[in-house]
Image (spheres, rainbow, N blue to C red):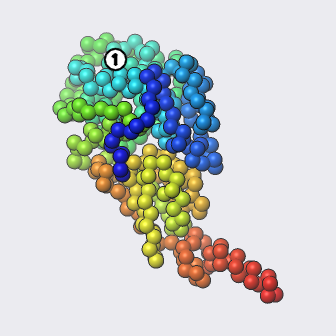
Amino acid sequence: MSGFLTTIDMKYYSSHVSKNIDTCLNTLQSKKPCNNCETVCPKQIMKTTPYTKINSEECIDCNLCLVGCPTRSISFSKKNALSIWQALNETSDDFIYIGCEKSQNYKNLKLFCIASLPWEFIVYAALKKPVIFFMDTCSTCNLTSHLDIFKKSLHRAQEFLGVEYHKRVLIEDKVVNSEIRKREIFKLFKKYAKDFIDDPEFHLLNDVSRKIMFKYLKQYDQDHGWKTLDIQANCIGCAICEKMCPNNAISITKSKNYIIYEHSPLRCMECMLCQTVCLFKGNLGLKSYNAKNSLINYATIKITPKKCTICGNFMPNEEDTMCIECKSQKNIYNFFNS
């Protein structure tokens, strides 16, 4: 976990996103190409090939590629990160009003698109103050396809916050009188509003939204809805997922009879690379995991795989009693001795 909450020495650009090619999904594997950033980019300047440079002159700094990136290899610009941080922490309003540039409602956080905010920042904002998302222009916008991104972020925030989500997040799809609406919302949220301690420290880090969310969550002694690995007995402990994980969230220990997975839900960016590269379909993806917000809180998964009757090594949970290697050696022996 070394360096996870410390400043990372990497180049950040003032007015456009930056991309860390070393953690791009297409750099790490080619089995399942990812084109999320290319698909969501309104200017079509993002490319799926990891070594393609971003055209900074055409980038409008909308954050959509950042939100859609499964490994968070795309980072905020300095300008955008600071503007979001200031909007969430310096507002004197009782609530955080969020909307796109076209929304006619009052807002203290103006985004290019309602989908331009990572789910971690939605959680962070909701824990500080009740949040209202204005969607009054979404039905007529030419970026309606991005609503799926927004819905996915809201769904993940809901999984994480649990019952607190509906107490702290509200969606408004109409243009409303700000003063009247403020009084109505205040009545709705009054009994749930709390005072929180602001964290004055702020560093521009690669996966800034996850780190800022975690710093704030350290104040809460309660479980939240993280995600952890869903490992089945078909796993043989080959450790390819451990080696490929871009965030070092997986640690595997093998003994004579079982395999133990130690998984860090906080480090995990839920990119599903571990499932993609799994050779024997022992990794079924992610499942819900309620846990305290701690760096040392690992999810422990213990499995007992099937063992080869000849060599004793772990093997996929199949009907055969021999592993592939022993079976091959037996076939070779039979061939030359028949």
Q: Quadrant of residue 317?
A: bottom right
Residue under the point 56% across and 27% down: 54
Residue under the point 42% across and 52% down: 249
Q: Quadrant of residue 162?
A: top left
Q: Name the foreground residue: 84 vs 176.
A: 84
Task: Say whether residue 62 is visible.
Answer: no
> For the view shown, which residue lies furthest in the right direction?
338
* Residue 121 x/y as whole percent: 36, 33
* Residue 200 x/y as whole percent: 23, 31
In the rendered image of this protein, does residue 293 appear above or below residue 196?
below
Left or right: residue 143 compared with residue 3: right
Residue beneath disc 1: 107
Mark 1 Cα-neighbour bin, 10 Å: few <14, some 14–19, many ≥20: many
In the rendered image of this protein, does residue 16 appear above or below residue 149?
above
* Residue 218 x/y as whole percent: 25, 44
Task: Say whether residue 125 is visible.
Answer: yes
Q: Name the foreground residue: 203 vs 320.
A: 203
Q: Quadrant of residue 234?
A: bottom right
Left or right: residue 82 compared with residue 338: left
Q: Name the foreground residue: 306 vs 171.
A: 306
Disc 1 marks which amino acid? Answer: Lys
Left or right: residue 278 compared with residue 217: right
In the rendered image of this protein, does residue 282 appear above or below residue 101?
below
Residue under the point 54% across and 65% down: 238
Instruction: Quarter of the image for the C terminus: give it.
Output: bottom right
Q: Secondary structure at mark 1?
A: loop
> For the view shown, which residue lies furthest in the bottom direction?
337
Residue under the point 43% across and 22% down: 14
* Residue 241 x/y as whole percent: 51, 57
